[in-house]
Image: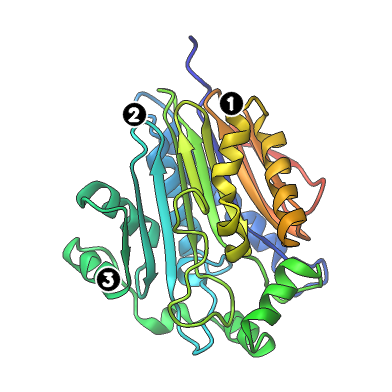
Amino acid sequence: MMAPSPTLVIHGGAGALSHTGYVDVDGLKSGIQQAARLGYRHLVGQTSSAIDAVEAAVCSLEDNPLFNAGRGSVLTVEGSVEMDAIIMEGRDLQTGGVICVHNIKNPVSLARLVMEKTEHILLAGEGANKFAREMGLAELPSEEFITESRCKALKNHANFQSAVKRLYKDRELGIDDHDTVGAVAVDAHGNVAAATSTGGITAQMIGRVGDSPLIGSGAYCDNAVGAASTTGHGEAIAKVTLARNVVFYMEQGSSPQDALEKALTVMKGRLNSQGGAIAVSKNGDIGHYFNTEGMIWASVQNGQLHYGVFPGEDLVTMY
């Protein structure tokens, strides 16, 4: 059997992304391309590694304040930042996640340390932050996570339901409203991996956990099938275990694109909630789909980088 062509697909969040100038669409496109290039470097050559690729891509998005993860995380109802992340590899189904961490520069890297350095799959709150300090992971002061745009979003969305409605229900024009980042990859050795990271949803309660750090909801992968990462209303995604559903449909013979469309259509019909997701099969076939106003995405395969934000948009540049 031929080895798959190394492939990376990433997303920077689905939601109410307007054309009216509230959102820095050019900045999002630039950021997603940069993350794709940084991630794809880990798929080139003999050291090709899907897990390294998804971590690097998500770290790049966490470092970019335009995206809702890491330094760009949205604010809780009390004006603080709580971050969640997950990473998973498909060979042995190992996974690690962190919940409600603060001051961590790259939560996805902390999730990987949970996967590789502990006997657990999830660490939360102060326990996760204590583990990060023990591992020497980079931290940033709280003020570096409090951006002007996130403060403005909290002011405009004084309660959680208002934020959810604007992001995922009514397709209204938002003010920098998009959710979560993620990546999936398959490497030259046939290993798949997935990662997802988020700051949550504006005005969420302290301690709220959505889908992102939950295995099967925010991300899932299996070398026998492929990998998926999701974005959208976390409570809805968790109720239908969206990432696992995508991989299940792929396991039943659907292409990644068809699997995504099926899974998101089921969620919309069952819960009247919208979102987006990306997927890659074990053979390197890719998919990206969203039923929100927009989703920032990119893919790299065979030296070509594709990216877009709005429905039907597929821009191409060389890697």
Q: Tell me the tag on residue 47.
A: 2
Residue drawn where x is 30% and y is 71% of the image: 139
Q: Position of residue 127 (x, y in %)?
A: 25, 70
Q: Amino acid at mark 3?
A: Asn
Cα separation between marks 3 and 1? 39 Å
Q: In this figure, which residue is indicated by the disc labeled 3?
A: 129
Q: Earlier in the sequence, mark 2 or mark 3?
A: 2
Q: Secondary structure at mark 3?
A: helix
Eyeballing the image, is 32 above or below 278?
below
Q: Depth check: 239 or 161 in front?
A: 239
First reached walking from the N terminus: tag 2 or tag 1: 2
Q: Secondary structure at mark 1?
A: loop
The residue under label 1 is which amino acid type? Asn
Q: Is residue 319 visible?
A: no
User: Which residue is painted at 49% across and 48% down in the image?
Assistant: 216
Query: Marks 2/1: CA distance?
Result: 17 Å
Contact check, label 2 and label 1, Cβ < 8 Å: no
Instruction: Give the side of residue 115 with respect to residue 203, left or right.
Output: left
Tell me if I can see residue 198 in this picture. yes
Give the x, y percent position of residue 110. Answer: 31, 59
Q: Residue at x 48, y 75 (%)?
A: 208
Q: In the displayed structure, would residue 220 be above or below residue 310? A: above
Graded by Cα atoms within 10 Å as few (under 14), some (14 to 19) or many (20 or more), the crowding at tag 3 reads many
- Do labels 2 and 3 touch, CB within 8 Å? no
- Which residue type does callout 2 highlight? Thr
For label 2, the crowd category at 10 Å Cα-Cα, with few meaning under 14, some 14 to 19 and many 20 or more, is few
At mark 2, the secondary structure is: loop
Q: Quadrant of the C terminus?
A: top right
Residue 204 horizontal/vertical position (percent): 55, 79
- The 10 Å Cα crowd at callout 1, few under 14, some 14 to 19, many 20 or more, is few
Kindly identify which residue carries mark 1.
302
